[in-house]
């Protein structure tokens, strides 16, 4: 019987994908109705090769502002970059800064390379210092700067001096955060004006430049020929924001897309094996419980919710093996975490829910999340909660989630996305002043543990402090880790050089081509 049910399930997935062929046929047509990317003048576009057709899961939520969720979208498309980047081991690597040194506990000097903004102006110390100053003054603060106060000043012909209010041993890693991208002065409006958010259109430094965007549907990018890192192989990118995961998988399967991110595990089987790419990621799917209002203000009910969750059932049933059971905020892709993990202490004893009514929310841009939410809903109901489920697109959900309008929220978060530093996500997501505190947690013990980790120098010592802070957070039951995910992407066999980055900051680079 189980084999027959699995067969029926597989056929339904295939037929669903097949039904989407007509609506996807024109999804990646070249702008203006010209020749497609499969041939003709607009396909080649230049001496370095044809354009890339990329299907992305998340449309811009904040009009391409680099200070919010769109920052990662910009870096994944090769539009923006910062003074530094992260290498494969998570250490700071040169980007717009070719080198740096620490002058004292609070001061670093970064030496700039010769580079050009996409508007034709030079990347100067004054422009870089101004860009960092704008980011430092942004409200809400970019997540990479959670709890950090910095001042940037030009220093000579090719230097920028960055001073922090408190010692910051991971500043070079922090400056690699997508939200600290360096933009030209034109991005911020005329002197004396204060635009709602800077625009990266034509003002960034990456190998690809946004030339057209229609809001939430698509964006056209052309190769930036004066990029300091050399000419990109692809002449441009035609990006489409396709929230439906089945549609993204189908676009690769039918040849309408060259690259599709975030393939749902339910659609992995519809792709030919050579087009399915999998890689480890530091992304964790978690259940965030609203600690400030509603039923989960009671620690005993949070404990009841935690004990009701069976994460192994989620990994097997929803993720179909493309994930690992939730063990903490940091999962297996953070290779040092498991050996340093500290057992949470001081947890409340679970109380009987007695029908306590809660609203559980999630978003459908990652198609596995509604399925996760349905299983969690059933597990919580079995434990005695009354659960209403609400599913929206992320751009229509984030502000309400941050405002605490839901009792529980299921989201997927890359724990090393913002800074590459394990302490960064703890400060932004779980402290009183955190800018992405979906659990609305404000706990003195947690704040002390995170503050201690922030001030800790030395790689091993900082990792130990981060795990102690993780234990303090888990001890509040504000968050229940559900699963540690893996990257699943669809990539045409004609494509080379796709960047499957465990930190999810990169996707297309100078070497990506077909």
Image (cartoon, rainbow, N blue to C red):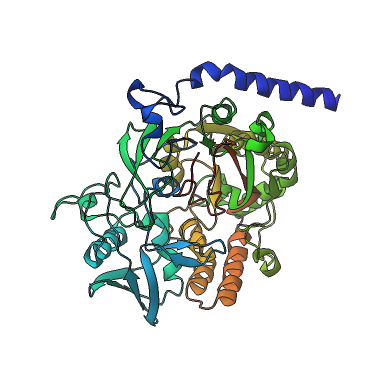
Q: Nearer the viewer, residue 148 or 46?
A: 46
| Residue 90, quarter of the rendered image | bottom right
> Where in the figure is residue 512, as x and y percent of width and height?
49, 45
Picture coordinates of residue 163, whole percent (x, y): 32, 74
Front-most of residues 186 and 138: 186
Outermost front residue: 47
Residue pushed farthest bottom?
104
- Quadrant of the image occupied by residue 5: top right
Q: Could you tell me residue 430's position as x and y percent?
A: 50, 58
Q: Quadrant where the N terminus lies?
A: top right
Residue 236, above or below 231: above
Residue 392 position (above or below residue 186)? above
**Count of labels in the image:** 0
**Residue at position x 64%, y 45% from top?**
278
Question: Does residue 386 show up?
Answer: no
Which residue is more in the foreground, 497 or 507? 497
Q: Position of residue 448 (x, y in %)?
A: 51, 71
Name the residue at 18% across, 50% down.
189
Image-based side of 78 in relation to 128, left or right: right
Residue at position x 51%, y 65% in the image? 421
Task: Give the quadrant of residue 245.
Answer: top right
Position of 26 relative to 179 (above/below): above
Q: Is residue 506 visible?
A: yes
């Amino acid at each position: 019987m189980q084999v027959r049910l699995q067969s029926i399930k597989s056929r339904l997935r295939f037929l669903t994908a097949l039904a989407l062929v007509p609506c996807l046929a024109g999804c990646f047509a070249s702008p203006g109705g010209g020749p497609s990317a499969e041939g003709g003048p607009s396909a080649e576009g230049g001496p370095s090769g044809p354009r890339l057709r990329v299907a992305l899961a998340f449309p811009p939520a904040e009009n391409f502002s680099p200070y919010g969720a769109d920052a990662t979208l910009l870096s994944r498309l090769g539009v923006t970059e910062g003074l530094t980047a992260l290498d494969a081991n998570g250490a700071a690597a040169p980007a717009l800064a070719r080198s740096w040194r620490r002058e004292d506990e609070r001061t670093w000097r970064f030496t700039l390379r010769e580079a050009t903004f996409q508007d034709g102006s030079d990347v100067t110390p004054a422009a870089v210092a101004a860009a960092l100053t704008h980011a430092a003054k942004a409200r809400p603060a970019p997540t990479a700067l959670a709890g950090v106060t910095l001042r940037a000043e030009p220093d000579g012909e090719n230097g920028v001096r960055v001073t922090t209010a408190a010692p910051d041993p991971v500043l070079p890693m922090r400056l690699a955060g997508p939200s600290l991208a360096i933009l030209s002065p034109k991005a911020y409006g005329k002197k004396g004006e204060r635009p709602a958010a800077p625009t990266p259109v034509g003002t960034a430094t990456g190998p690809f430049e946004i030339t057209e965007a229609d809001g939430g549907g698509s964006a056209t990018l052309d190769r930036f020929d004066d990029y300091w890192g050399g000419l990109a192989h692809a002449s441009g990118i035609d990006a489409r924001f396709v929230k439906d995961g089945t549609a993204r998988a189908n676009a690769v399967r039918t040849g309408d897309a060259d690259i599709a991110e975030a393939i749902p595990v339910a659609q992995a089987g519809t792709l030919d094996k050579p087009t399915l790419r999998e890689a480890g990621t530091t992304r964790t799917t978690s259940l965030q419980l609203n600690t400030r209002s509603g039923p989960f203000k009671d620690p005993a009910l949070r404990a009841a919710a935690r004990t009701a969750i069976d994460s192994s059932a989620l990994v097997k049933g929803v993720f179909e093996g493309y994930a690992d059971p939730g063990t903490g905020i940091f999962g297996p892709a953070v290779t040092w975490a498991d050996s340093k993990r500290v057992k949470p202490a001081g947890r409340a004893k679970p109380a009987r829910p007695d029908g306590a009514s809660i609203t559980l929310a999630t978003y459908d841009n990652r198609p596995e999340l509604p399925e996760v939410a349905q299983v969690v809903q059933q597990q919580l109901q079995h434990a005695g909660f009354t659960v209403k489920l609400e599913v929206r697109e992320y751009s229509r959900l984030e502000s309400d989630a941050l405002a605490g309008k839901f009792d529980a929220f299921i989201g997927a978060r890359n724990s090393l996305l913002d800074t590459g530093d394990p302490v960064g996500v703890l400060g932004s997501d779980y402290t009183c002043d955190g800018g992405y505190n979906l659990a609305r947690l404000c706990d003195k013990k947690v704040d002390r543990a995170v503050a201690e980790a922030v001030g800790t120098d030395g790689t091993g010592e900082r990792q130990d402090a981060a795990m102690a802070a993780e234990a303090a957070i888990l001890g509040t039951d504000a968050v229940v880790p559900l699963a540690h995910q893996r990257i699943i992407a669809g990539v045409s066999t004609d494509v080379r050089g796709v960047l499957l980055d465990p930190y999810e900051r990169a996707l297309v680079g100078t070497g990506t081509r077909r």
